[in-house]
Image (spheres, rainbow, N blue to C red):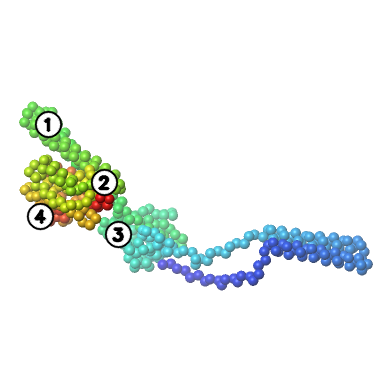
Amino acid sequence: MVSAAVTRAPPTPAPRFAITDAAMKQLFGLRAMIALLLVGVSSAAGLLLGAHVDSVLIALVGGAAAVLLAAGTRGDEEEAAPPPVPAPTPPGNEPRIADAIEAIGEPVLIVGDNRVLAANMPARALLGGHVIGEDVRLAIRHPAAAERLVTALDGDGDASVHLVGLGTRDQRWEMRMRALPGGRRIVHLSDKTGAHATDKIRIDFVANASHELRTPLASLLGFIETLGDEAGDDPETRTRFLKVMHDEAVRMQRLVDDLMSLSRIEAEKYREPDQAVDLGAMIAALASEFVSTQGARGSEVVTRLDPVPAVKGDYPRLSQLLHNIVGNALKYGRAGTPVTIRLTRDGQMARLAVTDEGEGIPPEHLPRLTERFYRVDSGRSRALGGTGLGLSIVKHIVERHRGRMDIHSIPGTGTTVTILLPLDSAA
């Protein structure tokens, strides 16, 4: 902290009486009249005492002129006088820099003679409260920052320095400096972790989407080229190749549909649904649909439905959510084992849980399951027709409905996906 002791002068006592400008002018005009009267009286006395008339007149005119000249000079001096200058604010009343930087929400330090003179609360939380008075290179322990902190600044400021691992291992900061009077400088640390994570997600998404589209497209082009040669003459080969081409085209269509669906859901993210949706009726209809489309495996869907009021939601999106979760359970659960759908009430929320009896998911993969294109087993997922976007779509649907999602899995036993959705207060 930098502080200064200021000796204050004792306040000047205010005058007991104050005379305004108008009063002064009136007072001076009265004095001029008295002076002229005295000049007249003295001239009359001179005549009575036998003085010569010319001498008396000269004295009278001169006295009157002197009085009038004195009155005019006084008025000019009053008009030419400059207005009073207000007293300057004592230096001790100015806010200190150390107090000012406390209003900044990001870490800020004041450095002088290569030591930390002041640090606001975010800086103390990041670097520790002991940094005040410490060498700045020890306060900000980072190789990329050490040299820049002690070198002279170029002009008024300096180029930013990117710091990785300051605070926590994955945090990223941008450090900027600016010169202050007295040889001091201000150091500002800006957290860029979120921006970097967003950029990484965008880059990974584009790369993964390109890869997922390129793989079936390469297969299609290869089979088309082969059919154009001698293989097209063999009916059996042609039939087999056309089936592969159809499957790859369907895979591409499914991927494009999921990408477009994800884009629409993200665009609607901040628009809260306003429909009343009966989840019990939706689940019953879904179970009947899987029986007709999935054959024997679809008949293994078991429902356990309690009477639950309608939820506040978007019917098409909630139907898509159910299809994705139950579809995953059917694909990754062991054949011949049930997939159980439970619907219960949990306070002001509807609790939907889908449980399979499959191989389960190792704990280290659980936090990343809702990332786009993340797969525990890429080969198996592609073989089963997965796009890697199903759970990411589910997560965004749940967020739009202001709900919660939890995935619990035991390797070798199975996985349970639980969704909590707010009930419709009107219903």
Q: Position of residue 261 (x, y in %)?
A: 23, 42
Q: Residue at x 11, y 36 (%)?
A: 244
Q: Callout 1 environment at 10 Å: few (<14), some (14 to 19), or many (20+)?
A: some
* Amino acid at pointer 1: Thr
Q: Earlier in the sequence, mark 4 or mark 2?
A: 2
* Amino acid at pointer 3: Leu
Q: Residue at x 24, y 44 (%)?
A: 262
Which residue lies under the disc numbered 3?
166
243 lies above or below 419: above
* Amino acid at pointer 2: Gln
Q: Residue at x 39, y 65 (%)?
A: 118
Question: Considering the numbered disc 4 on the image, is that residue within a helix, a strand or a loop?
Answer: loop
Q: Position of residue 415 (x, y in %)?
A: 13, 53
Q: Position of residue 422 (x, y in %)?
A: 25, 52
Which residue lies under the disc numbered 2?
275
Q: Earlier in the sequence, mark 3 or mark 2?
A: 3
* Gap between marks 4 and 2 measured at Cα: 37 Å
Q: Callout 2 environment at 10 Å: few (<14), some (14 to 19), or many (20+)?
A: few
- The label shown at residue 226 is 1
Q: Position of residue 56 (x, y in %)?
A: 89, 63
* Gap between marks 3 and 1 measured at Cα: 56 Å
272 lies above or below 130: above
* Gap between marks 2 and 1 measured at Cα: 52 Å
Q: Nearer the viewer, mark 4 or mark 3?
A: 4
In front of the other: 65 or 277: 277
Q: Would residue 160 appear left or right of 77 to someone viewing this image?
A: left
Q: Earlier in the sequence, mark 2 or mark 1?
A: 1
